[in-house]
Amino acid sequence: MPHSSRRAMLSAATAVAALMAVSACDDGSGSDTGGAASPGAAKVAGVTVKKDQALHDALPAGIKKSGTVRVATDVPYAPFEMFVSEGGKELTGLDYDLGQAIGAKLGVRFAFTPQKFDGIVPALQAGKFDAAMSAITDNKDRQKVVDFIDYSQSGSGVLVAKGNPKKITTLTDLCGSPVAVQAATNQLKLLTATQADCTAAGKPKIAVSTYPKDSDAQLALRSGKVVADVLTKPAAGWTAKTADGGKAFELVEDPKAPGGYNASPNGIAVSKKLPELTAAVQKALQALIDDGTATKIFDKYGVASIAVKEATRNAAVD
């Protein structure tokens, strides 16, 4: 998803509170940043993932020797990466769980270390990390300096009250209704662009209400001031799954936009100096997709619809 909307998701405090409703990563072995699985096997999202010796053998010699892939991640960014407890170091989240599963398949540890988002790619270039998993949008500019293995497609989503009382299924169903959105986000741009579709369909325009934070937009939805909140789809799915134990909100699933509106690929970034690692991670991810493990990990965080069916490499075209 575009980095400009990363902070349109849950705030750190909200992420920590929401996390209390969902269990952390299933593997429990320790590491400095949150229980990286020991080489050979890991239990993630209820699935035991075992080492593939052929994939392990294909790894770069340095990684086989160390037994570790050094992974950068920007925390928190729910539901992709979060701290298990406020002030703690133990990590959880979609990226973290997926990393543990890939690591187990490769027979090495995926050791996650927090890194500010704008410093991730430079750190990869400098050799501080081997890879990064942080809901990074795959685009042509970034492809010049890192390689991506794409694992999701995500864009904007629509959050409604539980039960979807207005029966909203598409963006144009919002025409003529009050809708909340965080100010200065890609989601506001999306709603602005949708106004023309409302006019073309002979419907009134969307009554857009902007808020400083998405948590404020969610309060407006809770109170009935608006019929929907438009935010990034992963955030919408996570909020629907965790708020009030899943009883407050519902995620709209538009079959024509399974990854969300204006969806873009997110990828695992790997240093261009490690092509063998890129190839091995791609094959490991595809194996997890094929056996259903990846789907279970995405579903654990309420965002099964953004998962890809094929682990592509450098899929972005712009």
Image (cartoon, grey):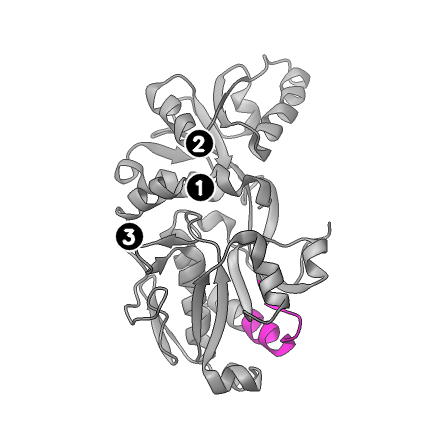
Q: In which quarter of the image is residue 92?
A: bottom left
User: Which of the two discs, 1 and 2, sits closer to the camera?
Assistant: 2
Position in image of residue 238 (x %, y %): 39, 43
Q: Is the magenta stretch mostly helix, strand or loop?
A: helix
Q: Residue at x 44, y 71 (%)?
A: 110
Tell me where the magenta segment starts and ends, as one range. 269-283
Q: Is residue 251 or residue 85 the one in the foreground?
A: 85
Q: Residue at x 49, y 71 (%)?
A: 70
Q: Residue at x 56, y 59 (%)?
A: 120
Amino acid, disc 2:
Asp
Q: Is residue 303 or residue 210 the one in the foreground?
A: 210
Residue designated by label 2: 214
Position in image of residue 38 (x %, y %): 35, 77
Of helix, strand and loop, which one carries label 1? helix
Badge number at residue 85:
3
Residue 53 appearing in the image: no
Check residue 6 for magenta coloring: no
Amino acid, disc 1:
Ala
Q: In this view, does 83 lie to the left or right of 168?
A: left
**Relative vertical location of residue 163 with respect to residue 54 in this rendering, above or below:** above
Position in image of residue 266 (x %, y %): 57, 54
**Relative vertical location of residue 173 with respect to residue 295 in this rendering, above or below:** above
User: Which of the two discs, 2 and 3, sits closer to the camera?
Assistant: 3
- Local packing at callout 3 (Cα closer than 10 Å; few below 14, some 14-19, many 20+) is some
Q: Do the residues labelled 1 and 3 touch (CB within 8 Å)?
A: no
Task: Return the disc, 1 or 3, that comes first in the chain's sequence.
Answer: 3
- Local packing at callout 2 (Cα closer than 10 Å; few below 14, some 14-19, many 20+) is many
**Relative vertical location of residue 235 with respect to residue 174 in this rendering, above or below:** below
Residue designated by label 1: 235
Badge number at residue 281:
none
What is the distance, in whole Å, between disc 2 and disc 3 at their CAs?
22 Å
